[in-house]
Image: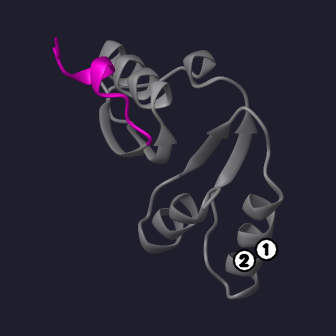
């Protein structure tokens, strides 16, 4: 939670990982400290709305356990930039995704 997957990706792949959240979480910094203490790479964090982050075509935007509308923001922002995306959602409202009458 709160950046753990971002740190795992940074530690296991040769890529820069930036966690974006509206509010910096204590857990993010605790995970970063733990990863670095083991000599592993860790993600960095920026506090802002994802839509304020400039994306490139070679970026991968992922959201783990993002609540409902956050998934839509991730997919829309990444798609507009031509970036790849991956969402593992929670708390889905069916009428946001399905044409249910």
Q: Residue at x 76, y 63 (%)?
A: 27
- Give the extent of the magenta segment: 91-101
Q: Quadrant of residue 59?
A: top left
How far from the left and from the top, in percent, is residue 36?
72, 77
Q: For mark 2, does the 10 Å Cα neighbourhood hold few (<14), some (14 to 19), or many (20 or more) residues? A: some
Residue placed most toward the observer, 12 or 67: 67
Q: Nearer the viewer, residue 78 or 68?
A: 68
Secondary-structure class at tag 2: helix
Q: Quadrant of residue 40?
A: bottom right
Residue corresponding to mark 2: 36
Total tally of numbered discs in the picture: 2
- Residue 94, how many percent across, how many down? 29, 27
Q: Residue at x 79, y 70 (%)?
A: 30
The disc at residue 33 is 1
Between disc 1 and disc 2, the foreground one is 1
Please report contact status of discs 1 and 2: CB closer than 8 Å, yes or no: yes
Q: Residue 50: give x, y in percent of width and height.
A: 58, 25
Mark 1 lies on a secondary structure that is helix
Quarter placement of the N terminus: bottom right
The C terminus, quarter of image: top left
Q: Which residue occupies 44% across, 64% down?
A: 14
């Amino acid at each position: 939670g709160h950046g753990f997957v971002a740190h795992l990706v940074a530690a296991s792949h040769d890529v820069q990982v930036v966690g974006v959240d509206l509010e910096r979480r204590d857990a993010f910094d605790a995970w970063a400290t733990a990863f670095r203490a083991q000599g592993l790479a860790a993600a960095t964090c920026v506090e802002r709305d994802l839509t304020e982050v400039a994306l490139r075509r070679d970026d991968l935007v992922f959201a783990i356990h993002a609540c409902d509308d956050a998934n839509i923001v991730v997919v829309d922002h990444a798609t507009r930039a031509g970036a790849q995306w991956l969402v593992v959602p929670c708390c889905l409202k069916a009428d946001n995704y399905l044409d249910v009458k």
